Amino acid sequence: MKLTTFARVRQLSGWQAVAFGATLLERSLPNYQLFCELTGFADPAQYRNTLDAIWDWLANPKARINLAVQLEKTELAIPDAADFDSYGVYPAIDVGISLASLILLMMDEDPQGAVVISKLSQGSVEAYIEATSESELSADEVKSHPLMQWEIEFQQALLNSIDNASRTKGSMRALRQMATEEGITNIGLEIS
């Protein structure tokens, strides 16, 4: 029996779960950065710096991060949908919640953090497809949409890569590259 994406993500633990979450965040982070640039909300560099510190920890197990401080900074920089009338606030919120989930995973406070990030990434894609569609879409139409197909394929390929990876600088660099090599975010925005 072939396991679903979420079932496979649920089986990840330790650095592999963190690497999975970090790779999905690397791919969706520009959604947050663009939102900040367009609205003047928060400093987009903060999430970038936090994610860089997590990548550094993945590549160098002895690296130290003050996770409690990073979590507080992350949570303070999650936008409130009620404060904005642009669609971009929703993918930005998903990035903020994903980053907080990743930090909680690293703090051993949310063992399912990688699953949360996996579902939020797919949810962002689903919401984007529905928001940009001319008409009401069925669940099957959303599922068969090229952007959703790409999201599911990306997460499956990422799981395969992590299954075969070791915790080395080279492996982490490869995962990071995998996240950006297409040049677009999970919702199809161009990464500049």
Image: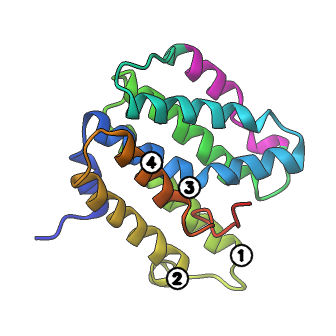
The residue identified by callout 3 is 27
* Quadrant containing the C terminus in the rendered view: bottom right
- Kind of residue sitting beneath label 4: Arg
Please tell me which residue lies in front, 16 or 35: 16
- Cα–Cα span, label 3 and label 1: 20 Å
Mark closer to the chain start, 3 or 2:
3
The Cα atoms of the two marked residues, 4 and 3, are separated by 14 Å
User: How far across and how far down the image is residue 166, in percent?
Assistant: 25, 44
Task: Relative to 141, say whether 121 is above or below.
Answer: above
Q: Residues within 10 Å of mark 3 (few under 14, many from 20)?
A: many
> Which SS class for mark 3?
helix
Mark 1 crowdedness (10 Å alpha carbons): few <14, some 14-19, many ≥20: few
Closest to the observer: 23 or 131? 23
Kindly report which numbered mark, 3 or 1, lies closer to the viewer in this rendering: 3
- Which of marks 4 and 1 precedes in the sequence? 1
Tag 1 or tag 3, which sits nearer the N-term?
Answer: 3
Residue under numbered circle 1: 132
In the image: residue 32, left or right of residue 183: right
Q: Calculate the distance from the C-alpha at mark 1 to the C-alpha at mark 4.
A: 33 Å
Q: Tell me the element at label 2.
A: helix
| Residue 146 circle label | 2
Q: Residue at x 52, y 82 (%)?
A: 145
- Check disc 3 and give the amino acid type: Arg
Q: Label 4: few (<14), some or many (≥20) within 10 Å?
A: few
Residue 75 within the segment the image draws in magenta: yes
Residue ID for mark 4? 173
Please provide the residue range marked out in magenta. 69-83
Q: CA distance from mark 1 to mark 2?
A: 13 Å
Does residue 18 show up magenta in the picture? no
Numbered tag placed on residue 151 in the rendering: none
